[in-house]
Image (cartoon, helix red, strand yellow):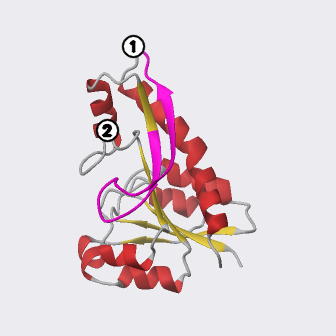
Amino acid sequence: MKKRIAIFASGSGSNAQKIMEHFKKSTEVEIALVLTNNPDAYVLQRADNFEIPSHVFDRHEFYQTDNIIDLLKNLEIDLIVLAGFLWLIPKNLIVEYPGRIVNIHPAILPKFGGKGMYGDNVHNAVMEAGEAEGGITIHYVDENYDEGEYIYQAKYRIDKGDNLEMVKFKGQQLEHLHYPRIVETLLKKIKK
């Protein structure tokens, strides 16, 4: 029986795309659903391109109902992968999927994490702090932003002349290289 992933994303979904590509021909893993809180998110187009069903939800559905949990359970989801998803995960979802929700953060945590620290906000903070290195952290999700147990970290050098676009590019290269591979490793540990 295939192991099943649900991907949550709020925006463009480039990491979601890399994960879709990684498992496209897999006989053991299926991306069963892409979920978003943003009806205009480009990740919906990416899901459509791979013929993966999607679900758009609002704040009420996510925080005040069990609809999302019911949907995930009906699809027999094994692992929830956050790929640029900006909302805090509610406690009922964490309780339902303990140790089975992962996120990628565009910095070496614990630095540059927490509420509001995503995307360009993180990269700008790293550059303003004069850091010699940037990086990524793949971690389990708990009820606080960016505080779950770390699974994997990777670093890149920030050169003197690097602007925001260069730093972002270096970070995304690492994200796209490592996130699908780490997700696959985590899936292998889940018993069906």
Residue 184 appears left or right of 121? right
Give the camera-side residue of 105 and 57.
Answer: 105
Q: CA distance from mark 1 to mark 2?
A: 18 Å
Tell me the residue at 43%/56% (across/down).
Answer: 149
Determine crowd level at label 1: few under 14, some 14-19, many 20+ residues with C-alpha closer than 10 A.
few
* Dot placed on the residue nearer the N-terminal end, 1 or 2: 2
Q: Is residue 143 magenta?
A: yes
Q: Is residue 75 above or below residue 128?
A: below
Foreground pick, 115 / 29: 115
Q: Quadrant of the C terminus?
A: bottom right
| Residue, disc 1 | 160
Residue 152 image point, x, y percent: 52, 47
Frontmost residue, 57 versus 111 = 111
Residue 188 higher or lower than 177, as above or below:
below
Residue range highlighted in magenta: 136-159
Q: What is the number of the mark on residue 122? A: 2
Q: Which amino acid type is marked by label 2? A: Val
Residue 3 included in the magenta stretch of the image: no
